[in-house]
Amino acid sequence: MIKVAVTGAAGRMGSGIVRRITEQDDMEVVAAIEIPNTPLEGKDIGIQAGIDELGVPIVGSEKLEETLKETKPDVLVDFTIAAAAAQTIQTATKCGVNIVVGTTGFSPEQEAANKKAVEDNNVKAVITSNFSIGVNVFFKVIRDLTPILDDYDIEIIEAHHNQKQDAPSGTAMTALETVCDALGRDPEEVAVYGRHGHVGKRTKQEIGVHAIRGGDITGDHTVLYVGDGERLEIKHMAHKREVFIAGVIRAIRYISDAENGKVSDMTDVLGLN
């Protein structure tokens, strides 16, 4: 039985992950963590997630280390915000707990610290900007396609619900990095985030990245390849959050086969390398 701790357990993604874990024959939720001093503390996470009582109370994140030592999970799953997740990763890895992280918006410094924590504590990790199986096939397609269309103008567009806190999305940034890797360009040198005012003629090197926020859009991502007289659009649209949760479940199972001290991603989980 795979014992799982979930941070952000009472949120939309967290609750969905809890529900899906309880449907698996080989997994169980052993810990549920939320922000400190929330009115939800002490409540059963099963009831909060809309299912039967699980006997697992919600605890504040200030008790994370204590909770991990007491419940001894095999894997911690984190879908929170970057500042909180960065600290959670440090604590969980120090406790020898493997991690599956879908939080986005990490700074380069936080990403480096996350990687170092995994390496230094020799744990297993899956950290990715998007757990959707379809999105990771999308990444493979643009990785293979971009070198063929290297003389086309390339633009990246993403759309999400009005509650999303980071922009551009982690998935859009991964798409940018994938395109730049294929072209031998530095994302920091060629990315243009939106355009405003008299920006002048578009250069052949630049890659536009645009974020749309509105309503309840789960997540849309498009890479445009625009040439003279034609364009090609590679697009992925997520209709519901369950597509991400399905990927999380696969990542939890993959952890047992993952390499210690290495940060894996969904290309590893799905064998897309």
Image (cartoon, helix red, strand yellow):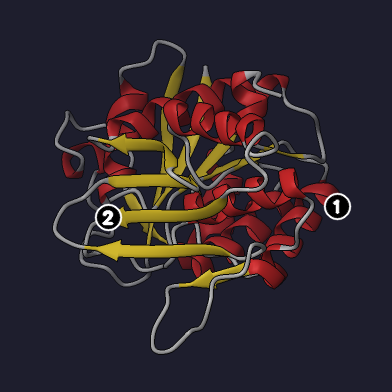
| Residue that numbered label 1 is attached to | 120
Tell which residue pokes out farthest to the front in this image: 229
Tell which residue pokes out farthest to the top in this image: 25
Which residue appears at 60% of the width and 29% of the height? 140
Label 1 residue SS: helix
Which of the pair 189/13 is nearer the observer? Answer: 189
Where does the image place residue 56, in percent across and percent down from the top left? 33, 40
Which of the pair 241/214 is nearer the observer? Answer: 214
Q: Which mark is residue 42?
A: 2
Which residue appears at 49% of the width and 48% of the height? 228
Which of the pair 8/167 is nearer the observer? Answer: 167
Which of the pair 42/2 is nearer the observer? Answer: 2
Question: Quadrant of the rendered structure where residue 13 is?
Answer: top left
Query: Looking at the picture, does residue 211 appear above or below residue 143?
Result: below
Q: Is residue 93 left or right of residue 170?
A: right
Res 172 visible: yes
Label 2 residue SS: loop
Q: Are marks 1 and 2 in contact (CB under 8 Å)?
A: no
Query: Which quarter of the rendering shows the C terminus?
Result: top right
Determine the CA span between mark 1 and mark 2: 33 Å
The kind of residue tagged 2 is Gly
Where does the image place residue 73, in percent across and percent down from the top left? 56, 36
Q: Is residue 190 left or right of residue 55?
A: right
Quick one: label 1 or label 2, which is nearer the N terminus?
Answer: 2
Q: Is residue 156 left or right of residue 95?
A: left
